[in-house]
Amino acid sequence: MNLVRKKPKFVVLPLLLLRLRLVFGQVVLSKGLVLRGSNLKMEMMDEDETSAPREGRPVLVILVGAPGSGKSTFGEDVMRSSIRHWVRVCQDTIGNGKAGTKAQCLSCATSALKDGKSVFIDRCNLNREQRSEFIKLDGRLQIDVHAVVLDLPAKLCISRSVKRTGHEGNLQGGKAAAVVNRMLQHKELPKLSEGFNRITFCQNENDVKNAINTYSSLGPLDSLPHGCFGQKNTDSKIQVGIMKFLKKAEVPLSAASTTSGTEDPTSHTLRKNNSYCKDKETLSSISDNANLETKEVEGQEVGSAGYHANQVYLDDIPTLAFPSISTSDFQFNLEKAADIIIEKVVEFANKFRNARLVLVDLSHKSKILSLVKARVVEKNMDTQKFFTHVGDITHLYSKGGLRCNAIANAANWRLKPGGGGVNAAIFNAAGPELESATKEKVKSLSPGNAAVVPLPSSSPLFTREGVTHVIHVLGPNMNPQRPNYLNNDYYKGCKILQDAYNSLFEGFASIVMNQPGIPVGKSENLGRKSLDLPVWSDCSSRKYFTSTDQKSKRGDDHGSEKSKKCKGNQDGLGLAFTNSKDEKVDSEHTRTERSRSKAWGSWAQALHQIAMHPEQHKGDLLEISDDVVVLNDMYPKAQKHVLVLARIGGLDCLADVQKEHLQLLNKMHGVGLKWAEKFLNENASLVFRLGYHSAPSMRQLHLHVISQDFESTQLKNKKHWNSFNTAFFRDSVDVMDEISSDGKATLKDDDKLLSMELRCHRCRSSHPNIPRLKSHISSCQSPFPAYLLQNGRLVNAPGEPRNSVP
DNA sequence: GTTCTAGAAC
DNA sequence: GTTCTAGAAC
């Protein structure tokens, strides 16, 4: 399945009127140039900005394109007619007229930018890695970073490269075709999430001409609107399917055209081709490349399609856009706020891998954005997961091509519209629907708290921007004119701001968890892990916040939201077992009570989540039935390592298992055997063992089906080894016998077992450390101990004599 | 469950 | 100096 989202067709209305919009104190000429400084005296600035120098920021334009795409010509053309001071940094000539290094380009670009000059980086920059260091200059210097993508047909680039003579990069003649082909095969089109403020895609020569005009007419005091421009819809057929898959709100044509159909006449160069791209992902040049009739290029086409599909998916991850809390009207110290934002974002990113945060502010000169950006660079943070964006938080998609499921509102304590700033803008943009939805949900908010409000589908923010939730947040106030004034008590203030971001991010996490429309992973083949995203379990604790402790600690609005969710889980459980007899339900309750005595950390909940809501994890699962779910262990400790997960609630671990579950155990064992046999069909040399950990780390009863090679880099320590190779590991067959005869399983959960000396599971030889043990087992051919060869504890391929039961 | 890292072991 | 473990934090 191709993971491509539909790009709504976009209609640019004829430009009749110049429309000025006043957004948060900044005058924006719709869809055109944002004029600043002397160009537009009426521009309003906030206090922070008045001290800033009244001149445009230097622009770093990273040209992206294959040899022959016209990068150098682009730069030269702009420089010829621009009144701005441009410098072209060309890697092909930077070494005294000869090819130089990336480092030379970086240093040359840095010094030009420091001098206030704008810079073209003239090198292919076809993949993310090649671009990343240039983008990072943004954090150190006060600049805008743009990409201009010369995404012209491969055929054209090749024919130009082949024809030319005396090329700076010495790429000409016959070898050019091969080089261009190879380069395009691995190209990664730039995305805003890499850290670009603006990306312009040019897919034909007319697009290029327009982009040259745009940059040529950029005066020293002007800046170009941020966002993604000029990308065209290339495959509506695939995209419709994906829209369905993602269950995303479509952007109605009428909404799109009316909200962005007005342009600034001064920026006519933008008009023709710079339709705002509605998605940051691209498919653009696949069709171009397909024109080349070589075998290599056929392969490239397939590769590109797969690559792009992944990119689309990565860009489709749940996204929260949030304004900086308390730093505007509430006058909170910017440095302190930036530190807290970074701290909380890092915490969130560690726990929640499959989601993205975007700090948004209106102004290019936003101090808080600069401070945060600098810290992002300093800490070398992953800009896929967190980045800053200049734009209007109520038009992130329609004006900036940035899809956000949720947006945060810097609310007031009464949760009322008005008051100015982000709060007024969001309530305005969302229509009365938000006000009534908010009222229904929660009455007021105290500082440090957040309230999640699902946005009715009739709200313009929903239909136009695809925002499904608004999260109201209230931060600390350092403004004596506003309620809850903290009188500069930054000890309290920081605490409250931390709480505010905690609540905000937890609220966002709860949305992601509960929204079946948001995929948490997707793969075409059941057995294959999807991308680099977590497939399940321990690590997906980063995806889910379900700590019951956290819930009980928090008595705020957000907390009540969560307890509803918790109830929902229980309901879901009930639904899954509608055929259960009443007594079964009762015993479930008692078990639930009992298992509360064991504290499960938030990280230990992932399997439980999957068992309760497997439909939300379809892409990660190998098999789903009424009773069990089968999935690959996220951190396999052997070549093959899958988990058979019981779906019944209240059955957290082996200790909870009773006689009534015997049938379930049988079922789990049967399913486990089936998978072992499947793997044995693929590789008859494997041997499997099926069993339970006496004291599992993860909540929800799960059967390990693990091949006995233990060939895995994930097997790293003594505990890993001993949990599968001491009595701590309870063979499924034994557990079933014990339940059947005694009604309970024997648990060998003494910690001593897990710290025992390391012994080979075949020859029982002892080894001083894990590396030595692993080295030994990689070649040990001894038969397994007699104990394991009995009673079907080991499962091997039929006809494999060496492990057969005597 | 993993990751991180100080300090032990080599 | 490097490798490895084990405990804390999440």
Image (cartoon, coloured by chain):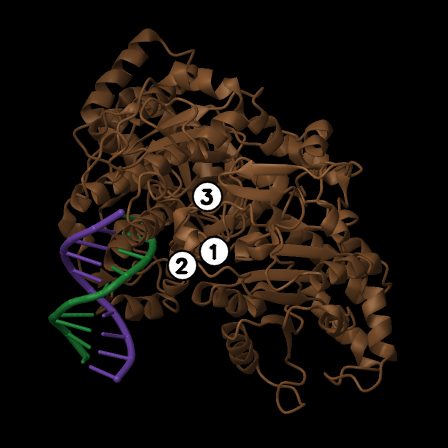
Chain colours: A brown, B green, C purple
Q: Is residue A524 visible?
A: no
Name which residue type carries label 1: Thr
Residue A494 at x, y = what percent? Answer: 23, 45
Image location of residue A170, percent across then percent down: 75, 85
Q: Would you name the residue on which mark 2 appears?
A: A376
Q: Chain of mark 1?
A: A
Q: Position of residue A803 (x, y in %)?
A: 41, 54
Residue sitting at x 18%, y 40%: A487
Q: How many other residues sit within 10 Å of disc 3, few (<14), some (14-19) or many (≥20)?
A: many
Q: Give the quadrant of the N terminus of chain A.
A: top right
Same chain letter for marks 1 and 2: yes
Q: Quadrant of residue A702?
A: top left
Between marks 1 and 3 in the image, the one whose residue lies nearer the viewer:
1
Labelled disc at residue A355: 3
Rendered image quadrant of residue A131? bottom right
> CA gap, disc 3 to disc 2?
17 Å
Q: Are marks 3 and 2 on the same chain?
A: yes
The reply to whether dot 1 and dot 2 touch (C-beta < 8 Å) is: yes
Circle nearer the N terminus (3, 2)? 3
Between A797 and A121, the residue placed more toward the observer is: A121
In the rendered structure, the residue with mark 3 lies on which chain?
Answer: A
**Which residue, given by chain and number where applicable, does mark 1 sit on?**
A383
